[in-house]
Amino acid sequence: MDIVAVRKDFPTLEHSIAYLDTTASSLTPLSVIEAMDEYYRTYRASVHRGLYSDAERATRAYEDARAKVATFIGASPTEVVFTAGATASSNMLTYALEHSRQWNEGDEIVTTVMEHHAALIPLQQLAKRQKLALRHVPLGPNNALDYDAAHSLIDARTTVVSVMLASNVLGSIQDVQRIARRAHEVGATVIVDATAAVGHLPVDVRALEADFLFFSGHKMCGPTGIGVLYGKEALLADLEPGFFGGGIVEDVTLTEATWTRGVERFEAGSQNVAGAIGLGAAVEYLTAIGLPEIHEHVRGLTAYAQHALSEVEGVQLFSAPPEHNVGVVSFTLEGVHPHDIAEIAGRNGVAIRAGHHCALPLHHALRVPATARASIYLYNTEEDIDRLVHSVKEVKELFGATTAI
Amino acid sequence: MTDIYQAHILDHAQHPRNKGTLANPDVSIKGRNPSCGDTLVLELSFLNGTITDVAFDGIGCAISQAAASILSERLRGMTTADAAKLQADDMYQLLGIPITDSREKCALLALRTLHDALGAETGAPKNV
């Protein structure tokens, strides 16, 4: 991978920011911006509606994007629903499942303590409404999932199992296939939150044995406001729509409506056409560079960052080993709140995130109120990490100076 | 350089005054900063409409901790009526540092918790 060439693809980097906040949102390459720009400038039209050439071109571009995304995750285009993002996917899926199935009191949902709020809370709400038990796979040694516990938690009462492929705090990559196999043994439906993983690792929905899988576009070089919900074709066919409106109906009377077949049933209303086109361009961009190359680059920098940060006295790392990590290095510095680290880093042009990263239960399990998080992607360099470490040392000096008084 | 981390802020953050709990508080109320998970417990004792004792506990960034410490010093001996009138601008003045939008919630956590305790308004929109 030619890092110099890659960095030129990202206009944001021109103002010399050390951008280490990809897990919040990645930067956008020119090819994605240009693909959306072209749509807005030259064939701006709604999809699946107009009979004029721009509308037909927009529809083709939108469906091409769906096909690209499908190939990217090993799915068929008939299994890829465009949404507004991972949170929308998760909420819509939970709603759709709730209204497509018979739930019995005492049925169980199994998820994990490391889930993002976007995956966890819709399930909490579902469990409350339907009087289901919500169970959580705990952490085992080295903050990995406790797979033995998962195996025994998932049993005949389990109807849904939800697990994140990569942690947005620890960077760790979960053995989703192992969880999915156990879930399918007991007839449960498997939901995978792949938001932190897609764009970092080759993701194959069949290899993972996922029934449903979702992610956002904006953490994988795509634009904001677009995401994906994958569902196995046979399962999507039995699913009620999660949102209602135009474009999803076969027939409508004053009191009733019936739904179209296929993924359009889940895309009510005018769609985010530019977003989908941008996401398709992001998939092309990442594929051209190569996910194995990207992961190797990220792995090297993750190892570099873990080593450099661990050399600073008082730093505690919460970060999976580099080879099983999507480039997330969370840490604390003794005696200093992570917000103060992020503030001082920010003043030095180093973008990191501080807080609980929408994973409060995980922070409770890690027994820290908050962490500072550096997240690494294809455009980062050792210099970015050096600037971060320099800032951490500066924080330490600033806060250490008064402690000594 | 980092103008918000002035010596008095760091001093209050690292050596907070009135940190801990009261034996028999008249009110003990929890404040939260939802965006970062910071928590604050503020305890007050009253006598004839005057705050006679104050303590706080919790976890947060230097700004939120310093704000709680500085505010706690200000509150002792103050009437509850006057304390209820303290506004966001008063808190900024007590802190004596420029507060940007992103640190507003940190700076005002203690004041908002105080106002929750007294049933008063902070004079700045909540959850901004």
Image (cartoon, helix red, strand yellow):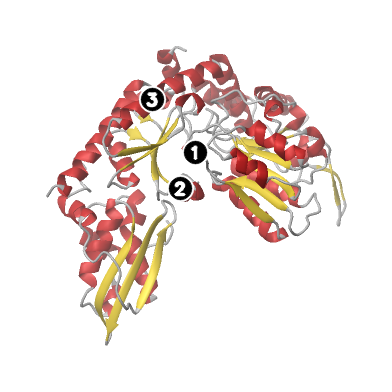
Please report the residue visible at 31 percent of the width from the left and 51 percent of the height from the top.
Answer: B61
Question: What residue type is disc 1 on?
Answer: Pro
For residue A356, above or below residue A74: below
Q: Nearer the viewer, residue B98 or A174?
A: A174
Q: Which of marks 3 and 2 is nearer the N terminus?
A: 3
Q: Does residue A189 show up?
A: yes
Q: Can residue A230 be seen in this view?
A: no
Q: Alpha-carbon distance for marks 3 and 2?
A: 31 Å
- Residue holding disc 3: A13
Q: Is mark 3 on a helix, strand or loop?
A: helix
Count residues near mark 3 (Cα–Cα under 10 Å), then give few for <14, some for 14-19, many for 20+.
some
SS of the residue under disc 1: helix
Q: Name the residue under label 2.
A: A363
> Is B55 above or below relative to A328?
below
- Circle 2 — which element? helix
> On the image, which quarter does residue B11 sit in?
bottom left
Mark 3 → mark 1, Cα distance in angstroms: 38 Å
Badge 3: chain ID = A
Is disc 3 in contact with disc 2, using a CB cutoff of under 8 Å? no
User: Sequence-wise, which precedes: disc 1 or disc 2?
Assistant: 1
Q: Position of residue B48 (x, y in %)?
A: 27, 87
Q: In this view, does A67 lie to the left or right of A221?
A: right
Percent position (x, y) of residue A220?
54, 29
Give the class, few, some or many, for how many residues have Cα within 10 Å of label 2's Cα (few <14, many ≥20): many
- Sort mark 1 into few (<14), some (14-19) or many (20+) by Cα contacts within 10 Å: few
Q: Mark 1 points at which residue?
A: A141
Image check: A329 left or right of B25?
right
Q: Can you give x and y, in whole percent of width and height, for residue A378 in the image?
A: 46, 22
| Picture quadrant of residue A212 | top right
Q: Position of residue B46 (x, y in %)?
A: 28, 81
Q: Quadrant location of residue A246?
A: top right
